[in-house]
């Protein structure tokens, strides 16, 4: 039996998702979270086999939750379930450690299939998402964003800085030293040809790394 954690800030959506999951003979919902902080807490308390996370949530957004979960439970399969079909969201989610990405327009049976796939260690992208990524690849280097050159850790540090966190707070979240965070910060400034943290924050917003 696959034990599933669901995180979505809309109660009616969670109720529908719970029904879909619980109607499957292979899986059950063991925890529900309405925000990012609860998702992290419940993941630690219940040790789910798969986490299904929405991107747009109050407090910590889904991408930050994925980042933090990946740092403390690197083997946990994480499936993004969201209304966002834009390629920049897909790329960011995969860069911070999501195992799969499915949209809320997908059929119920596709959600079950996606959970099964990521639990088995296979990546999963819904049809519209796969098409968006294929178009991005077809455009080649001309279609690449400056963010595509950043590593997962660089994106984590960049998001933290853009959200107003101190180097110490970022270091504590990702279990690295304050000096390492500052090294990444300086590397980001050089790589992106920016001058200060304010410009890093502006870059993160313009490139969809955080939501206002």
Image (cartoon, rainbow, N blue to C red):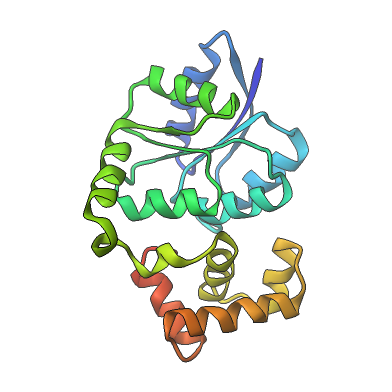
Q: Position of residue 127 (x, y in %)?
A: 30, 31
Residue 6 location (% of width, % of height): 56, 34
Q: Residue furthest bottom?
A: 195
Q: Determine the image quadrant of residue 96.
A: bottom right
Q: Is residue 188 above or below residue 138?
A: below
Residue at the image position 52 percent from the left and 11 percent from the top: 24
Q: Nearer the viewer, residue 77 or 36?
A: 77
Quarter of the image with the C terminus in it: bottom left
Image quarter of residue 78: top right
Q: Is residue 112 visible?
A: yes
Side (left or right) of 102 relative to 74 = left
Residue 138 rendering spot, x and y as whole percentages = 23, 49
The reply, left or right, for residue 191 in relation to residue 71 is: left
Horizontal side, residue 125 vs residue 38: left or right: left
Q: Quadrant of residue 147?
A: bottom left
Residue 83: x percent and y percent?
34, 42
Q: Which residue corresponds to the image point at 31% horizontal and 50% vertical from the top-left?
A: 87
x 39%, y 71%: residue: 205
Nearest the viewer among 16 and 81 is: 81
Q: Is residue 187 above or below residue 110?
A: below
Label total for image: 0
Q: Residue at x 45, y 40 (%)?
A: 10
* 4 w.r.t. 191: above or below: above
């Amino acid at each position: 039996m696959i034990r599933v954690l669901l995180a979505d800030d809309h109660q009616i959506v969670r109720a529908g998702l719970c029904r879909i999951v619980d109607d499957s003979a292979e899986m059950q919902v063991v925890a529900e979270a309405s925000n990012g902080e609860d998702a992290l807490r419940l993941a630690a308390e219940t040790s789910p086999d798969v986490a299904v996370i929405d991107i747009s949530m109050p407090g910590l957004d889904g991408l930050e939750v994925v980042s933090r979960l990946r740092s403390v439970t690197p083997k946990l399969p994480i499936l993004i379930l969201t209304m966002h079909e834009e390629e920049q969201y897909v790329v960011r989610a995969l860069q911070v450690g999501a195992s799969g990405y499915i949209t809320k327009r997908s059929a119920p049976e596709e959600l079950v299939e996606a959970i099964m796939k990521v639990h088995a260690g296979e990546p999963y992208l819904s049809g519209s998402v796969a098409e968006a990524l294929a178009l991005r690849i077809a455009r080649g280097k001309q279609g690449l964003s400056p963010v595509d050159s950043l590593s997962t850790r660089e994106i984590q540090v960049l998001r933290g800085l853009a959200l107003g966190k101190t180097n110490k707070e970022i270091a504590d979240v990702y279990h690295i030293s304050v000096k390492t965070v500052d090294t990444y910060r300086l590397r980001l400034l050089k790589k992106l040809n920016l001058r200060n943290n304010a410009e890093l924050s502006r870059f993160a917003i313009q490139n969809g790394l955080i939501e206002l």
